[in-house]
Amino acid sequence: MKIPLFPLSSIVMPGGIMPLRLFEPRYLRMVSDCLKTDTGFGICLIKDGGESGAPALPYHHGTLSRIVDFDQGDDGLLHITARGEQEFTLTDIEIGEQSLLCGTVQLIERESSADISYDFSELAEKLSLILDHVEPHISFETRSLDDAEWVCNRLLELLPIEAGIKYDMLKTPDLQQRLQALDALQFSVAT
């Protein structure tokens, strides 16, 4: 599967939402093409480079995302909301028209989180507090704080973790290991 890539300094995971403001012609065209063809694009964490200007080098793990809402903001920029659908691994990257990165990706199938035996209740409590603080900017129809994968994905999206460490967690295929890595961070949330 070949998709356009959007390297960012933040990530979206399956079930997550990401508001974006776009101004670069390559990304405006990407959005137009995605809407016309009802296809998605890949959001990847930046390994080297910046979010604008020359194409950034992404890490080889990302999330296939789809546009679920768009409008022109008061600032004149295109505002979109993307929803993460499925994780992928990049197998090839090329620079296309207007310096838009395109990647050949292999979608990753994840096992169900229903069988997880890890006690993630403390992580769920911390996530609930974090969501209370970001709610005006990012909101979810339902908070699935009893779902290990949902809790893990939202923490990976929201915690300010250094990119290399976050990537190590992303490429870990086992949900329990991801939860253990998040627990090992021993972060606290001010109330």
Image (cartoon, rainbow, N blue to C red):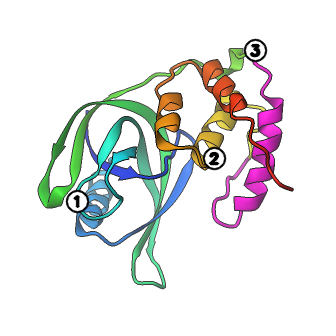
Labels 3 and 1: the sequence-earlier one:
1
- For residue 91, above or below residue 10: above
Answer whether labels 3 and 2 touch (C-beta < 8 Å): no
Answer whether labels 3 and 1 touch (C-beta < 8 Å): no
Number of the front mark, 3 or 1: 1
**Is 57 in front, or is 27?**
57
Marks 3 and 2, how far apart at CA = 23 Å
Mark 1 lies on residue: 54
Provide residue 21's location: percent of width, then percent of height. 43, 69
Mark 3 lies on residue: 117
What amino acid type should be assigned to the residue bearing mark 1?
A: Ala
Q: Residue at x 73, y 48 (%)?
A: 142
Marks 2 and 1, how far apart at CA = 27 Å
- For residue 14, above or below residue 114: below
Whether residue 152 can be seen here: yes
- Give the residues drawn in magenta, as a range: 117-142
Labels 2 and 1: the sequence-earlier one:
1
Farthest residue toward the left? 97
Q: Residue at x 70, y 60 (%)?
A: 134
Marks 3 and 1, how far apart at CA = 45 Å
Mark 2 lies on residue: 159
Q: Residue at x 51, y 20 (%)?
A: 173
Question: Considering the numbered disc 2 on the image, is that residue within a helix, a strand or a loop?
Answer: loop
Farthest residue toward the right? 191
Other residues around mark 1 within 10 Å, as few (<14) / some (14–19) / many (≥20): few
Question: Considering the numbered disc 3 on the image, is that residue within a helix, a strand or a loop?
Answer: loop
Confirm whether the magenta stretch covers residue 124. yes
Provide residue 16's location: percent of width, then percent of height. 57, 46
> Image quadrant of residue 55?
bottom left
What amino acid type should be assigned to the residue bearing mark 3?
A: Ser
What amino acid type should be assigned to the residue bearing mark 2?
A: Leu
